Amino acid sequence: MSLRPYLWHYPITRLLTIMAAYSASALLSYAYAASQIGEVTTVPKTMVTESPAETGKPKVINPGPNRPANSDKVWDRILPIGGQVAIYNGYDLPLPFGVSFLYSYIEQDQTISNMKVGYGGPANIDINFLSFDRFRSKTNTPQLKLDAWVLPFLNVFATVGRIKGTIDIKMSMPKGSVVTSDPVTNAINDGIQAYCAKNPVKCRAGSALKPDTPPDIFNGEPWRLNAEAEIEGYNYSFGAMLAGASGDWFYTMPIVYTQTNMKKTNVSGGTLNIQPRVGYTFALEHGLELNVYTGASYMDSNQTISGGFNLETMEASRDFDSPHTIAFKVDQENTDKWGGILGVNFNINKHLSSAIEYTGVVGDRRQMILMVNGRF
């Protein structure tokens, strides 16, 4: 989640020359993006030195067109690789390592497919008489992030976070869709009847509320059910970010892969997130900077979720033997892949910055990110 660009500006023609001469150690730029990473300040075209002919008074000396502005400075840190090349060519590098605290809220629709259920055993029976009209997740995720600049234009990072939230579920079933009463459909019917008995207002049969008559999924009218399920777990992300700039304009593109470990269910698969963006840097007084950017977020989440689900309480469970609990296995995918981004970052100094980012300008997905970043 890129939140603050710190950029190494470089003309493209000279960039290509440096790429050929120094391999991968100096490219177009270096910046801060997906993780609020670092700071770069352009070195002035003149240098201040102390003249021995004067009594310690600083003197400004033009280095000349063939002498780099920062040729006497030594980059004494292990990262980024190629840092000395950037220093030699007159650019100040950011502190290479970062620690960030992020808070993320995401709300998005999910598409459910290939649902299998089981009762008293594994989920191995296809079920197609349930229709998920709405399956919308709302999650809160505080995260800790570590990052490092490995090249002047490339940052790598990893995060770990705790997920907690809810899923709004709207299910429906057309009349006559179940024609048999095997143990699985009996378990589903009994579980739904028990839920509707406790939550009659959330169960609709036909077009009218019937709080005293839970729907009969075998012989009754078509029904719809609204429920809310709680989710809890952890996620782990790994990513890299490329960045570049021209003048005060900058661009970044973080690429992140996330895996999830839920507390009461098993999850396989992961989420790929790519976020191209462009922005502008405003220099403020006292060395402060404000960065405003926009872009797009592509998120592709493909996961297979399995476990047990108690239809009476609408909660996941690892215990398949509980009453009204069925084993399930289902494929889950986020419905809307693209979302528009707006973000601002406030850079206090080389050690501290903060940012806020909103996804949802375009598309159905809503995401808010708050972040504080420290560098050393």
Image: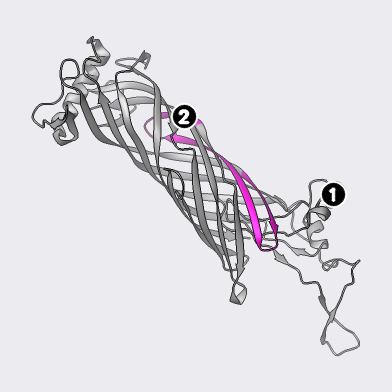
Q: Main secondary structure of the magenta part?
A: strand
* Foreground residue among 231 and 275: 275
Q: Report the label total.
A: 2
Does 92 sit above or below residue 261?
below
Relative image position of residue 87 (x, y in whole percent)? 79, 62
The residue at the point 91 percent across, 88 percent down is: 53
The residue at the point 33 percent across, 25 percent down is: 308
Q: Is residue 267 magenta?
A: yes
Q: Is residue 144 magenta?
A: no
Relative image position of residue 226 (x, y in whole percent)? 24, 34
Q: Which residue is mark 2?
A: 303
Horizontal side of 374 relative to 66 (left or right) equals left
* Foreground residue among 175 and 162: 175
Residue at disc 2, secondary structure = strand
Q: Earlier in the sequence, mark 1 or mark 2?
A: 1
Task: Please give the label number shown on residue 22.
Answer: 1
Looking at the picture, which amino acid does disc 2 mark? Gln
* Foreground residue among 249 and 225: 249
The magenta span reads 240-269
